Image (cartoon, rainbow, N blue to C red):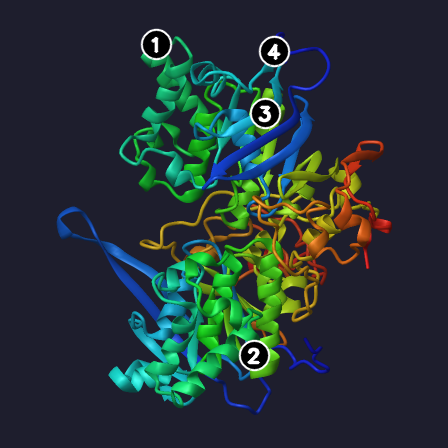
């Protein structure tokens, strides 16, 4: 794999290029039915999420189970369609497209899911699995498609002579995921949506697949929407990272900035939960008590406030709007970590993050 | 803590444990002669890829493998030999002396039974206590594993609980009879990082309180570095490296096996800059029915030489407390 001499600067908003994908105010809700079909409540899975992905850029999304990150990915794909909001992909408004028009728009947007075996038909050979999208979109003729399948297998590091005739059950998890990737890139998409795509793999295989993603990024100029619950994994592949909690982005910014100088208390808690391979240095501390509240009745104001050590009265009253506090680095928090904790919060102690503030600002805010 | 415990030495001693399955006339050696010991109050991490034999080895000790599995060697729990015991004899030890927690809590719990009842059953299976005493103890256990409002949760079904809560219930059941040994098999793998940290801390705290020995099986070396006293690395059914966690990881770490190094290097790390290539070893673990003559890792090893394929290196204690099986061990912990 070639090393990239110059990377695209992370999170360039100033870039004159138009975004490849642009989502605005996406909302996805599901009605929960109780026994007998009575309306039980509405799960607010995704609430007013907006983001852009530039050509060649990787946006990573991290969050806990139930944060809505997979629902968000599916809303982008229009499967199912979001309740409101817009998704603009290469100047096409996906939420307005139907039938064949939507299918052909989605051709450039492919996805890789967590369970490779679940996304590969067990009765098909690897060759037919990878060829299917080429057949469906009638790319070239029979011979050229056959050749293309072999190129694709080569690209993902599987020997066509050995693997083309096999069935998914004859593959290991890592190999099956490679087949799923080969299939996803068969039509040369410009955007690959990966939902926990490497999470079920052993660490050595996972590293191989991550390197493959990196290689495809260089060779095909792919953009990624990379969703995972593992923070280190997301950091590894992403230019920008969004942290999601209960259906909302609480922090978005360049990877380095978000991980080195987190602004949202939730991001900090997630980072503190990572087990370190440096013993003694810092054991992962369970800084976050309790569990996310139900998305059926999310807390008023800031949705994280019920678990936040810095929560104050203002957090229950007002929904925090995203603010840009560092270049390209947005946070939706009334009391971001560059400021002292509010005086009426449980953690009325100075923030751990460096930038010092005058001691009396806390009072002023409270 | 308990007076019955031997004053000195290990709680569990495993010696030359071998497990083989016969599949289609071929012998699959899943565990190929492993030895280790765990002391009360200590934590041992068994690390390896899928198929390395880490789970099978522990299931053999628990007596949880299908009949027809060939198990040989020895596993002594407080001096009692477990290998060769009948199912009925083993059942007495399971739950009361040793317990196991698995990866998927949803599958360890009965979906049609209230969680309180499931814990009560576990207590009554091993202890002669009245129903009300068992219920009281069950509520106490729910409180012990930090389930909020235990009296209410007692009457709920598993599907009403989150993944982390379910795993707490499974742990409560495992702890019902105060086992001396708890084996956690990928118990936190399916959980979120924040929940994982909560469960690991809970396990370690309970371990200290009850002076339990804890074995946790994982593929995650990061978890081992953070929580284990002792680390065992398995590859193709064998232990390839064993050392105290402090000795293995960190700045002055003395990793000797290329395989352990490869596992460590392949972990994405928040300190790594984005888009950097991860060092990888190619290939796959060998077919357990056709293990190579020499070192099993040699076909994938970057520093393999002729002697590696000719003869398998034995697991030898080369330095105090540090055992490894390699002809050409890493210098300086293998750091590049």
Question: Can marks 2 and 3 be said to lie on one chain?
Answer: no
Spatial distance from mark 2 to mark 3, Cα to Cα?
55 Å
**Residue toward you, A295 or A149:** A149
Spatial distance from mark 4 to mark 3, Cα to Cα?
30 Å
Dot 1 corresponds to which residue? B130
Dot 3 corresponds to which residue? B72
Secondary structure state at the residue bearing disc 1: loop
Are the two marked residues, 2 and 1, in contact with CB atoms closer than 8 angstroms?
no
Secondary structure state at the residue bearing disc 3: strand
**Residue A93 can be seen in this image:** yes
Residue A155 falls in image quadrant: bottom right
Rendered view: A305 above or below B68:
below
Are the two marked residues, 4 and 3, in contact with CB atoms closer than 8 angstroms?
no
Compare marks 4 and 1 and give the one earlier in the sequence.
Answer: 4
Question: Can marks 4 and 3 be said to lie on one chain?
Answer: yes
**Residue toward you, A172 or A161:** A161
Secondary structure state at the residue bearing disc 2: loop
Are the two marked residues, 4 and 1, in contact with CB atoms closer than 8 angstroms?
no
Question: Can marks 1 and 3 be said to lie on one chain?
Answer: yes
Spatial distance from mark 4 to mark 1, Cα to Cα?
23 Å
Dot 2 corresponds to which residue? A57
- Percent across and percent down for residue A163 are 49, 67
Are the two marked residues, 1 and 3, in contact with CB atoms closer than 8 angstroms?
no
Q: Quadrant of the C terminus of chain A?
A: bottom right
Residue farthest front in this picture: B25
Total numbered badges shown on the rendered structure: 4
Residue A47 falls in image quadrant: bottom left
Query: Chain ID for label 3?
Result: B
Query: Chain ID for label 2?
Result: A
Are the two marked residues, 2 and 4, in contact with CB atoms closer than 8 angstroms?
no
Dot 4 corresponds to which residue? B2
């Amino acid at each position: 794999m070639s090393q990239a001499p110059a990377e695209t600067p992370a999170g360039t908003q100033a870039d004159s290029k138009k975004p490849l994908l642009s989502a605005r105010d996406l909302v996805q809700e599901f009605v929960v039915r109780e026994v007998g079909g009575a309306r039980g409540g509405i799960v607010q899975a995704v609430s007013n999420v907006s983001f852009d992905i530039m050509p060649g850029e990787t946006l990573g999304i991290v969050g806990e189970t139930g944060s809505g990150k997979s629902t968000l990915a599916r809303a982008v794909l229009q499967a199912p369609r979001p309740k409101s909001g817009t998704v603009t992909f290469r100047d096409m408004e996906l939420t307005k497209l139907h039938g064949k028009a939507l299918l052909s728009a989605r051709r450039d947007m492919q996805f890789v899911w967590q369970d490779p075996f679940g996304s590969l038909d067990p009765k098909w050979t690897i060759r037919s699995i990878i060829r299917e999208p080429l057949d469906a979109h009638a790319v070239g003729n029979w011979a050229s498609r056959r050749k293309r399948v072999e190129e694709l297998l080569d690209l993902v590091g599987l020997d066509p002579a050995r693997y083309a005739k096999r069935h998914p059950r004859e593959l290991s998890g890592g190999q099956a995921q490679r087949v799923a990737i080969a299939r996803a890139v068969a039509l040369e998409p410009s955007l690959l949506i990966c939902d926990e795509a490497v999470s079920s793999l052993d660490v050595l295989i996972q590293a191989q697949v991550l390197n493959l993603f990196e290689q495809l990024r260089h060779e095909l100029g792919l953009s990624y929407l990379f969703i995972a619950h593992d923070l280190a994994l997301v950091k590894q592949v992403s230019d920008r990272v969004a942290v999601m909690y209960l259906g909302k982005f609480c922090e978005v910014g360049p990877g380095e900035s978000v991980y080195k100088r987190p602004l949202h208390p939730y991001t900090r808690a997630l980072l503190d939960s990572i087990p370190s391979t440096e013993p003694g240095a810092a054991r992962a501390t369970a800084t976050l008590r309790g569990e996310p509240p139900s998305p059926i009745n999310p807390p008023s104001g800031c949705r994280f406030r019920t678990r936040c050590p810095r929560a104050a009265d203002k957090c229950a009253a007002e929904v925090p709007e995203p603010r840009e506090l560092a270049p390209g680095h947005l946070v939706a928090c009334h009391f971001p970590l560059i400021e002292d904790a509010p005086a009426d919060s449980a953690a009325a102690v100075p923030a751990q993050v460096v930038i010092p503030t005058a001691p009396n600002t806390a009072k002023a805010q409270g | 803590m308990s007076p019955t415990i031997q004053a000195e030495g290990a709680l569990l001693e495993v010696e030359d444990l071998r497990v083989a399955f016969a599949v289609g006339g071929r012998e699959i050696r899943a565990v190929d002669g492993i030895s280790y010991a765990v002391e009360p109050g200590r934590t041992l991490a068994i690390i390896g890829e899928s198929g390395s034999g880490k789970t099978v080895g522990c299931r053999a000790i628990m007596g949880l493998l299908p009949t027809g599995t060939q198990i040989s060697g020895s596993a002594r729990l407080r001096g009692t030999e477990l290998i060769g015991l009948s199912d009925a004899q083993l059942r007495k030890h399971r739950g009361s002396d040793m317990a196991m927690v698995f990866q998927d809590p949803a599958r360890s719990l009965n979906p049609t039974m209230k969680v309180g009842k499931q814990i009560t059953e576990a207590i009554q299976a091993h202890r002669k206590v009245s129903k009300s005493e068992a219920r009281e103890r069950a509520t106490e256990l729910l409180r012990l594993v930090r389930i909020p409002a235990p009296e209410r949760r007692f009457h709920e079904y598993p599907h009403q609980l989150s993944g982390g809560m379910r795993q707490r219930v499974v742990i409560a059941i495992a702890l019902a009879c105060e086992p001396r040994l708890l084996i956690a098999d990928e118990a936190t793998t399916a959980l979120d990082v924040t929940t994982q940290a909560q469960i690991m801390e809970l396990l370690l705290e309970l371990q200290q309180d009850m002076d339990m020995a804890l074995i946790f099986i994982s593929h995650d070396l990061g978890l081992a570095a953070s929580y284990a006293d002792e680390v065992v690395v398995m590859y193709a059914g064998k232990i390839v490296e064993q050392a105290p966690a402090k000795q293995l990881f960190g700045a002055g770490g003395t990793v000797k096996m290329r395989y352990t190094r490869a596992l460590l290097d392949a972990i994405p790390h928040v300190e790594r800059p984005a888009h950097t290539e991860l060092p990888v070893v190619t290939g796959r673990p060998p077919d357990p029915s056709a293990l190579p003559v020499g070192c099993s890792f040699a076909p994938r090893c970057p520093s393999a030489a002729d002697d590696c394929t000719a003869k398998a290196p034995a697991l030898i204690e080369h330095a105090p407390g540090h055992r490894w099986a390699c002809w050409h061990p890493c210098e300086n912990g293998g750091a590049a």
